Amino acid sequence: MGNDSPGAGPGAGPGAGGVAVRVTGLRFAWPRGPFRLSVGSFVVRAGERVFISGPSGCGKSTFLSLIAGILRPTAGEISIDGEDLSGKGGPRRDRLRGDKLGFIFQQFNLVPYLNVLDNVMLPCRFSKARNEAATRVSGSAAKAARELIARLGLGEDLLDRPVSRLSVGQQQRAAAARALMGRPPLLVADEPTSALDADLRLAFLRLLAQECREAGSALLFVSHDRSLAGELDRAVEFNDLNEAGGAG
Ligand SMILES: Nc1ncnc2c1ncn2[C@@H]1O[C@H](COP(=O)(O)OP(=O)(O)O)[C@@H](O)[C@H]1O
Ligand SMILES: [Mg+2]
C-alpha cells in the first residue's frame, strides 16, 4: 500500500546490483599544510563491506568527509548509489547525504538533549526516502527505530534516556542504530571503536557488519587497528589508495 515507487520492488535492497561508492580522479589538499590526497579509482559494490586502515594522520577522515560530501574535492568525481555528489550544490548534496548515507562519527555526534529513540529517528525526519524505507520494512519509523535499538543490544529502559546519560559503548550502539535507520545504501564509520577495549571493538564491528548485511547496506569502516582487518569482505590500506602519499 502506497509503496509503489518505481524500482522499489520487494526484496530489492538499497542499490541492489549496483555500486555504493565510485571515486574517480579524486584530489584534495587542505588550504594550509603539506597533506595531499589523490585517489585515482576506488569502488565499493552495493552491499560490500570494506575495511580501511592506516596510521593516524594519513587522511582517512579527510577521505570519508569527501565521500560524505562534507568536504569538496579540488578535482574528481564521487558518486553514491549511482548519484553524482561532486557536481551538486550545498542543499542537494545535503539531501543526497541524508537519503543515501549513514555516518557513525568518531565522537558519535548524537544530539545530547534528545533521548535515544529521538536520536535514532533523526534520519527519518530529515529524509523522506529513509522514512519511507523504514515504514516499508517495519510499519512505522518509530517501530523501525525500536527494532534497531533492540537489535543493537540497547534495553527498552534506555529508549527515553537522554544520550548524555549513556556510557560510551551505549552511545556507540545508538549512533550505529541511527546510521542504519531507513537502510541507507552506504554506512560510513570513522574509527567508532577507538574508545573501546579490544574485545568490545571486535564485538561491535561484527554486530555492525551483520546489521549492514541484514539491511543490504554497504559499509566503509575506518580504523587504525589493523587487527580488525580480516572481519569484513575486503581490507584496504589507505596509504596504498592515496597516490599522493599523504604529506609526501
Ligand atoms: N581542518 C584541517 N585543516 C588542515 N589540515 C587538516 C585538517 N584536518 C586534518 N588535517 C590534516 O590532514 C591530514 C590527514 O588528517 P586526517 O584525515 O584527520 O587523518 P586520519 O583520519 O587518518 O587520522 C593530517 O596531516 C592532518 O593534520
Ligand atoms: Mg581520523
Image (cartoon, helix red, strand yellow):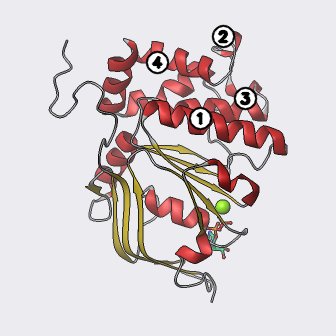
Q: Secondary structure at mark 4?
A: helix
Disc 1 residue: CB within 8 Å of ligand 2: no
248 and 44: which one is in front? 44
Q: Which mark is residue 176?
A: 1
The residue wearing badge 2 is: 156
120 and 21: which one is in front? 21
48 and 222: which one is in front? 48
For residue 238, which quarter of the picture? bottom right
Hey, what amino acid is under mark 2?
Glu
Q: Mark 2 and mark 1 in contact (Cβ < 8 Å)?
A: no
* Distance (Cα) linking label 1 and label 2: 16 Å
* Distance (Cα) linking label 3 and label 2: 12 Å
The residue wearing badge 4 is: 144
39 and 47: which one is in front? 47
* Distance (Cα) linking label 4 and label 1: 14 Å
Q: Secondary structure at mark 3?
A: helix
How far across and how far down the image is residue 35, in percent?
A: 60, 81
Hey, what amino acid is under mark 4?
Ala
In the rendered view of the protein, which quadrant contains the N terminus?
Answer: top left
Q: Earlier in the sequence, mark 4 or mark 1?
A: 4
For mark 1, does the 10 Å Cα neighbourhood hold few (<14), some (14 to 19), or many (20 or more) residues?
many
Q: Secondary structure at mark 2?
A: helix
Q: Secondary structure at mark 1?
A: helix
Q: Earlier in the sequence, mark 1 or mark 2?
A: 2
Q: Is residue 160 above or below residue 21?
A: above
The residue wearing badge 3 is: 170
Q: Earlier in the sequence, mark 4 or mark 3?
A: 4
Is 191 displayed left or right of 236 in the figure? right
Q: Earlier in the sequence, mark 1 or mark 3?
A: 3
Q: Earlier in the sequence, mark 4 or mark 2?
A: 4
Hey, what amino acid is under mark 3?
Gln
